[in-house]
Amino acid sequence: MTQVNGLASPPALRSSYRVFRTFGPVEGRSRKPFTEPEGEIMANPAPSTRRAQNRALFLSTLAFTLCFAVWTLFSILGLQIKQEFALSDTQLGLLMATPVLTGSISRLFLGILTDRFGGRWVFSLLMLATAACVYLLTFATSYPMLLLGALGVGLAGGSFIVGVAYTSAWFEQERQGTALGIFGAGNVGAAVTNFGAPFLLLALGWQGAALVYATVIAIMGVAFLLLARTDPQSERRRAEAVPLRQQLAPLVEVRVWRFSLYYFFVFGGFVALALWLPHYLVEVYGLSITAAGIVAALYTIPASLFRVLGGWLSDRYGARRVMYWTLIASVACTFLLSYPPTRYRVQGVHDILEFSFAMNLVGFVVLIMVLGFFMSLGKAAVFKHIPSYYPQHVGAVGGVVGMIGGLGGFFLPLTFGMLNDVAGIWQSCFMLLFAVSAAALVWMHYAILRASRQEWRAGREVTDLPELATPSRFVLQDWRPEDPDFWSEKGKRIATRNLWISIPNLLLAFSVWMVWSVVVAKLPQVGFDYTSNQLFWLAALPGLSGATLRIFYSFMVPIVGGRRFTALSTASLALPALWIGFAVQNPDTPYLVMLILALLCGFGGGNFASSMANISFFYPKREKGNALALNAGLGNLGVSVMQFLIPLAITAGVFGALGGEPQTLGDGERLWLQNAGFVWVPFILLGAVAAWFGMNDIASARSSFKDQAVIFKRKHNWLMCVLYTGTFGSFIGYSAGFPLLASNQFPEVDVLQFAFLGPLVGALSRAGTGWVSDRFGGARVTLWVFAAMIACVAGVLFFLGIKDQPGAFWGFFAMFLLLFFFTGVGNASTFQMIPEIFRQEVARLMPTLDEAAQRQQSEKEAAATIGFTSAIAAYGAFFIPKTFGSSIALTGGAEMALYGFIAFYAICVALTWFYYTRRHAEIRLQAPEHAAQTPTASPSR
């Protein structure tokens, strides 16, 4: 056995470990080029002269430097803008972070465009568009207009990936690390802004400084178009046009997201500090704007220029080793910087000893320069990986990695401002960076240890993300639920365990998804000055994002694995839960931040699609209906659990001092509204851990999107989308909108103590009335349900008309309980219809198939339709609360919205009768005796 970096290397690996010098678990000192371990063809660019290479590198680096200077413009201009527009720290943080959001998200699309059309034209047009946006910014007269202008300015940040793709195309692989390090040194544009912008600001004001920046970047855009040359790979791109789907294919590989994690800290943290440091230095150390800009430049210069050194070191010693240096040094620096000024009193032998600790300006500058130096090394190390692993997809993969890093530059400054407002400690920004860097270091080290212990000894090549590689004990290679012997011996036990871990995770997802339905009812009481329409927007947006995410989540289980995706999607709920807990403590939190939080709660809505898809793989057809009914029905209980638990949790300091101070209402009552978010975090973490270690992935759980896409041509897919929107869309929409509607119409009643009953009734009726559809037929029950819902809405209108009379609320509440009951029954009956509809439809459209093939095709189309209809129907969580809000804003009451619902339910009655229940219907769904003879799917899903 030979020793490699202190570890024994098996003989089988001695001949190959050296090629993993940069990216694998071992980083030897071989100077041999890296070889892709998983088979992607490695290709060097076409030969170019050294002069042409230097020309391309100089122009792209200069252009990126100026773009980066524009991208960080608000770090200096924001100080004067804050005074002129009287902004809070949170508003300033949002303004600084908004360009980073645009620059981050645009990187993915710009990378794809560069892969397809080349960097010369894309780079030039991007700079010209940025110049126009900076110019228009000078006309802003309000905070919303500033935010809109900042979105346009952010396009400059997308220039990074354009330059990476353009520059790497000119250089051979052995020199790409150094070349990209030189290009990445364009981050020094932040120092250009920190040095030059303060003088422009004092001389010309913020509008004049912006005009100078717009002029310079426009000139650079024209110059780049005239002086730059088309890269040497452009002819190959035109000859070998790559479909968009193939361009995006590498993004499903987990190694891409590993690179993204590191870049979130080294680049996202760099951008965040470049934006935040001038403000920090002015407030903490009392420096002038000019002095603060100069000191901030002492951070941005080493954090930019030494990226060149980072590229060379990555070529020489390996990117992983450089990442170790980066993260260890970052942990040490951020720990020291995060320590707030502290005074100590110690009881000595004779008297009390007093001493204090505080970071002076000199120490701060030294530490921030050291931090910037190591961050620059890390930025180069991360991007050394991409052209070597993905030479044909540098734009797409680099775009994703750059986007995640840029999103760090968006969320971190925003969070810095919120932490200042909530915690009241200036050093809280470095506390957050310490936590991020420490977590990244621990994760990376754990990955390396895991690889060395598990995979080297097996004589196999190491996966790039071994901590996410599924150990064999979690993968079900042999899964035959339709085999009675297999099912009884072990299949049922495994499936039951996965189901009962899935249910509480789905319950948590629904709880977080609908949490705004309760929070918005309390926001005005704790000082948030929002209109009724704004509150209804907050209640509605989680439904919009959740429904949209369902479309994507439904395809994730076959790609990522059910166990893994359940754990990761559950863990993602901690982000909105924690952020809500901080945001609601400060009434000055911008409304835009609250809108972002409402959208993030849509993570919970998306989980339904992946959870149902995952559980469906575990059960045989004869038991699938009951399993899915339990998963969906008990998962839906999360809405009522949330509406019951939160009114109790916000009345007590559940987390003590860690949970923050209470808000005092006008009558002296105290509320801990932050508990509405914090209370879910421990359960979310437990659920994610339980899913990771207790669930399984099924190796055979694979399906093709192309095979399922045929449903988009099926008329009955769209008809069932309408009908299921009428049932489930109503259930989830009323769950989101009822508490706020009732509070608005009956302000004298504490609605929150009753609100949970509606979703509870709907969830239980869904799980318990599937037999009704089996007995009388799904179509007939659906018809009755919509007729009953019309009557219930008419009852709601009646009691709203006499809402000033005694007992009107209880009649109003009773009508809504009946509405919830019938939505649950309808959820079951509509899904009971789908398998029979497609059994008949496939037989009619494909008569040449034999009976077995028709059954298989109908099951495939029915399953795809069930998933798609659940996504479309979830938009009810957005449209119903928003319709209530718009109705109240326009007419002063909810009556107009309710009349609209009656009209929609009447349309559903007509569609159900015309297509499914009348004597000569296109697809006649008969009951009960015919339904009893026909295999059906889940009575509720």
Image (cartoon, rainbow, N blue to C red):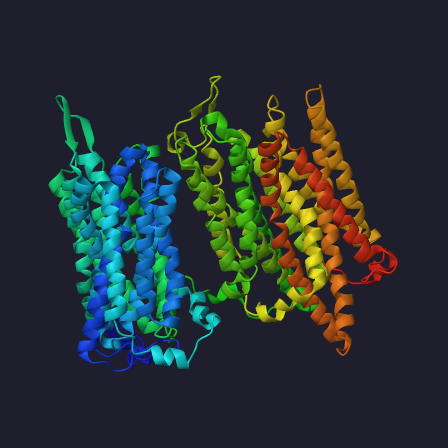
Total marks placed: 0
* Residue found 44% across the figure and 75% down from its top: 242
Residue 344 image position (x, y, % from top left): 19, 29
* Residue found 17% across the figure and 35% down from its top: 285
Picture quarter with the N terminus: bottom left
- Can residue 2 be seen from the camera position used here? yes
Where 198 falls versus 374 (above or below)?
Answer: above
> 498 or 408, which lies in front?
408
Residue 427 image position (x, y, % from top left): 25, 38
Residue 506 image position (x, y, % from top left): 57, 49
* Residue found 49% across the figure and 35% down from its top: 676
- In the picture provided, is 702 more to the left or to the right than 60? right
> 431 or 548, which lies in front?
548
> 183 or 633, which lies in front?
183
- In the picture provided, is 756 more to the left or to the right than 694? right
Residue 312 image position (x, y, % from top left): 19, 68
- In the picture provided, is 782 more to the left or to the right than 860? right
Where 34 falls versus 599 (above or below)?
Answer: below
Quarter of the figure with residue 54? bottom left
Tell which residue pokes out farthest to the top in this image: 667
- Can residue 262 be seen from the camera position used here? no
